[in-house]
Image: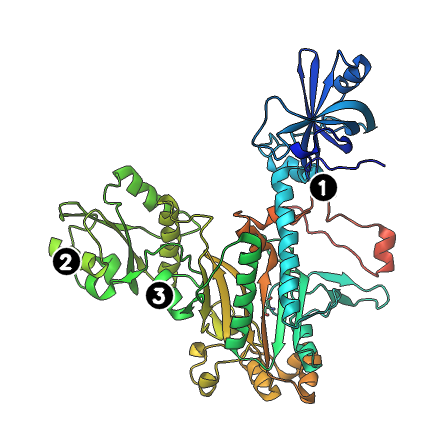
């Protein structure tokens, strides 16, 4: 028997018991004739004491231990003299009477502490050691708890968890596919699923009216921001539902998770906002509602006063930063630099200070009278002491730029508290998105999303303004997930493919199996998928999903621990009928 207790469970009430623990040596501390070993396992840390006077040989053995040695220790639980209230086991220690080294360890390349000395790259290379750290382990425990509660909730609602294939057909709509060569079918490839979308729709045709899956998805995208080439979705689909049914069911799921995992009760329905309003008021389809600072449009007030930047702009729009009129020149210059950085790409920033005495200071005093600027302030509901930050340009671009600035101001003013959660449904997304480069429409969500029935007559005449029956759930400025009511009528689906520029032949080649299935009684259906990694990271208060994935990839899509991707043997290539041509070195 290696152990009868864990390193996290002994309390004062256990005093006097003889116990056996196994774990890793966190640290040893020598104090006169005593050596204290902090023994760690998944459950916590327990202090084990070795007394030179009591047993010299045992004392020497304890002093010979190195960090991260795997050891078994036995002894009697005793009350500690100097208690440590920061540790759950801090009231006791083990007076050792035995020690056995189960395995030695080399000195780890970084300390196994929350506050480690190891940099990112090093920790990823030795991820198995990184995973020993409490702060990383906590995230995986949270992930487990959430997966468990998701299954509990969905099971209680009659959902069946059904696995769908990982080797699927490549359908180049959407992101780029990862592909897998087929040895048995020379020259042919599977793709890894970007999501189980088509399979879950087929399951609806098969009558499994409530499906879910905690599903691995794969997308070969450039890994900007917070992306991983493989990630996990809580993928769901339901039959005989309308948008309202889906929203209600999964709002229930999100509330369940917050309640049972975070002990946070959302008693009110989540806020809802149309895509149009989200863009107009926050410049984003995933607004962070933990704070206000809504956009206020000023275009009509600013034109025709000889300030060409505003005269020529499609949109002039601003936010009012409360209490920021005391910003120094340097701080204002920083904000201007912020909006000019390449990621944001604005040309400049206009500011107007409403001084505490009500007088106005601004960068555009040359073009606008004090009264005119006061009109701006009035429209923006500004009070003395506030700062107006205003930008001009093409509508969509300037909204995105001001959105960046709004988030930055929220950050600066401490309004983006990680312990505050502001969930929101964004609804009424456009069905299509125009792409200038390829001069064609793309599906904003995916080609199976149903148009809003009211807008079906506009499909040909006003394509760009047709609304989808699609919805996203957003928490704190992050898209947690999204979905839609699907098209279940094959004629409408054909029309959709036509508008997306598919010839009937190509549509058939790629999605023929779905279109065929739809000939055999497809029920009305809809669903959504939530980003599981993201959901965990939001609840963990983390900025990146990498920290909630046991073995993540780095920004170049590499696993630096096992050094993949990697070349394969010539014999493997031959078997697969593949020849590799490497790009020429530049
Ligand atoms: N399959 C979709 C996605 O991955 C989600 C859905 O529509 O259910 O975004």
Q: Relative to residue 568, is residue 529 depicted above or below?
A: below
Circle 2 crowding by C-alpha within 10 Å: few under 14, some 14–19, many from 20:
some
Which part of the image, by quadrant, shows the N terminus?
Answer: top right
Q: Quadrant of residue 92?
A: top right
Q: Earlier in the sequence, mark 2 or mark 1?
A: 2
Q: Report the side of 528 relative to 65 (left or right).
A: left
Q: Nearer the viewer, mark 2 or mark 3?
A: 3
Q: Quadrant of residue 276?
A: bottom left
Where residue 461 sits: x, y (%)?
43, 85
Q: Report the side of 424 relative to 539 (left or right).
A: left
The disc label shown at residue 372, or none? 2
Q: Which residue is mark 3?
A: 280
Residue 142 or residue 280, whichever sits in front:
142
The yes-or-no answer for disc 1 within 8 Å of ligand 1 is no
Where residue 99 sits: x, y (%)?
81, 24
Q: Relative to residue 226, is residue 59 depicted above or below?
A: above
Evaluate whether residue 3 shows in this view: yes
Residue 109 or residue 180, whichever sits in front:
109
Q: Which residue is mark 1?
A: 561
Q: Assess whether mark 3 and mark 2 are in contact (beta carbons under 8 angstroms).
A: no
Distance in Å between CA atoms under marks 2 and 3: 23 Å
């Amino acid at each position: 028997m290696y152990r009868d207790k864990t390193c996290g469970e002994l309390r004062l009430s256990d005093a006097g018991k003889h116990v056996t623990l196994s774990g890793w040596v966190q640290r040893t501390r020598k104090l006169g004739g005593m050596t204290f070993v902090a023994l760690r396992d998944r459950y916590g840390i327990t202090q084990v004491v070795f007394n030179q006077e009591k047993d010299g040989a045992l004392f020497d053995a304890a002093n010979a231990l190195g960090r991260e040695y795997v050891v078994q220790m036995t002894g009697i639980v005793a009350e500690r003299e100097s208690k440590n209230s920061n540790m759950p086991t801090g009231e006791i220690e083990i007076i050792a009477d035995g020690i056995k080294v189960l395995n030695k360890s080399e000195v780890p390349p970084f300390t196994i502490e929350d506050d480690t000395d190891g940099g990112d790259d090093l920790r990823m290379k030795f991820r198995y050691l990184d995973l020993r750290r409490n702060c990383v382990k906590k995230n995986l425990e949270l992930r487990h708890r959430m997966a468990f509660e998701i299954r509990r909730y969905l099971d209680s609602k009659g959902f069946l968890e059904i696995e769908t294939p990982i080797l699927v057909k490549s359908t180049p709509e959407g992101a780029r596919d990862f592909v897998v060569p087929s040895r048995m079918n020379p020259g042919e490839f599977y793709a890894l699923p970007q999501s189980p979308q088509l399979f879950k729709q087929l399951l609806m045709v098969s009558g499994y009216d409530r499906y879910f899956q905690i599903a691995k998805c794969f997308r070969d995208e450039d890994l900007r921001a917070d992306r991983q080439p493989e990630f996990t979705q809580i993928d769901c689909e339901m039959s005989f539902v309308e948008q309202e049914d889906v929203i209600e069911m999964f709002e229930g799921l999100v509330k369940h998770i917050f309640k049972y995992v975070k002990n946070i009760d959302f008693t009110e329905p989540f806020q809802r906002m149309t895509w149009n309003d989200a863009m107009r008021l926050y410049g984003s389809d995933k607004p962070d509602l933990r704070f206000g600072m809504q956009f206020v449009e000023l275009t009509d007030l600013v034109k025709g006063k000889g300030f060409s930047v505003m005269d020529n702009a499609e949109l002039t729009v601003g936010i009012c930063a409360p209490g920021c009129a005391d910003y120094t020149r340097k701080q204002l210059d920083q904000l201007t630099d912020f909006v000019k950085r390449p990621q944001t790409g604005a040309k400049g920033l206009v500011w107007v200070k409403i001084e505490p005495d009500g007088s106005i200071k601004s960068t555009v005093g040359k073009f606008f009278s004090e009264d005119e600027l006061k009109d701006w302030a009035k429209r923006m509901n500004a009070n003395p002491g506030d700062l107006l930050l205003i930008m001009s340009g093409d509508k969509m671009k300037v909204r995105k730029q001001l959105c960046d600035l709004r988030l930055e101001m929220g950050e600066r003013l401490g309004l983006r508290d990680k312990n505050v959660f502001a969930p929101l449904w964004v609804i009424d997304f456009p069905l299509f998105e125009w792409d200038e480069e390829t001069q064609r429409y793309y599906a904003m969500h995916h080609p199976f999303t149903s148009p809003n029935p009211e807008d079906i007559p506009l499909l040909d005449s006003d394509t760009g303004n047709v609304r989808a029956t699609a919805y996203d759930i957003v928490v704190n400025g992050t898209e947690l997930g999204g979905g839609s009511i699907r098209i279940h009528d094959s004629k409408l689906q054909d029309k959709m493919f036509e508008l997306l520029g598919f010839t009937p032949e190509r549509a058939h080649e790629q999605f023929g199996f779905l279109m065929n299935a739809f000939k055999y009684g497809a029920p009305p259906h809809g669903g959504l998928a939530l980003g599981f990694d993201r959901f965990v990271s939001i609840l963990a208060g983390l900025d990146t999903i990498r920290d909630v994935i046991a073995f993540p990839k780095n920004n170049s899509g590499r696993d630096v621990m096992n050094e993949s991707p990697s070349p394969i043997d010539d014999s493997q290539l031959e078997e697969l009928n593949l020849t590799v041509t490497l790009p020429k070195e530049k």
